[in-house]
Image (cartoon, rainbow, N blue to C red):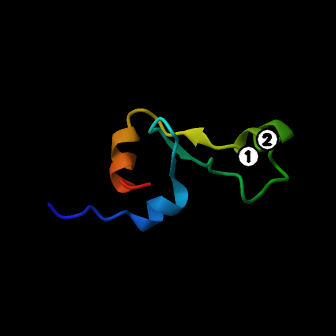
């Protein structure tokens, strides 16, 4: 059985937790910060867990992380 290659773009953006869940950063945090409220900017600052419908797909992209 050959090894599975890690998707390098996904490896730079996604991380696995100790329990095997995949985490990601929020979008819309980099540009045009003046028109966003402080609450929105604060909530976008932290990472979140990938939705459960996408967990399997993302885990296949980063099998060894």
Determine the CA span between mark 2 and mark 1. Answer: 5 Å
Q: Is residue 54 visible?
A: no
Q: Residue at x 34, y 41 (%)?
A: 56
For this orientation, the residue located farthest to the top is: 52
Quadrant where the C terminus lies?
A: bottom left
Q: Quadrant of residue 36?
A: top right
Query: Which residue is at the front of the view, 40 or 25?
Result: 25
For this orientation, the residue located farthest to the left is: 1
Q: Is residue 31 visible?
A: yes
Circle 2 Cα neighbour tier, 10 Å, few/some/many (<14 / 14–19 / ≥20): few
- Asked if marks 2 and 1 touch (Cβ < 8 Å), the reply is yes
Quadrant where the N terminus lies?
A: bottom left
Circle 1 Cα neighbour tier, 10 Å, few/some/many (<14 / 14–19 / ≥20): some
SS state under label 2: helix
Q: Residue at x 43, y 67 (%)?
A: 8
Query: Which residue is at the front of the view, 57 or 38?
Result: 57
Residue 17, labelled with which disc? none
Query: Which residue is at the front of the view, 57 or 16?
Result: 16
The residue indicated by pointer 2 is 42
Q: Residue at x 80, y 53 (%)?
A: 33
Q: Is residue 47 left or right of residue 35?
A: left
The residue indicated by pointer 1 is 45
């Amino acid at each position: 059985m050959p090894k599975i290659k890690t998707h390098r773009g996904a490896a730079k953006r996604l991380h696995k937790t100790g329990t095997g869940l995949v985490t990601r950063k929020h979008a819309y945090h980099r540009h045009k910060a003046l028109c966003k409220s402080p609450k929105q900017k604060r909530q976008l600052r932290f990472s979140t867990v990938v939705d459960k419908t996408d967990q399997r797909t993302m885990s296949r992209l980063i099998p060894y992380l």
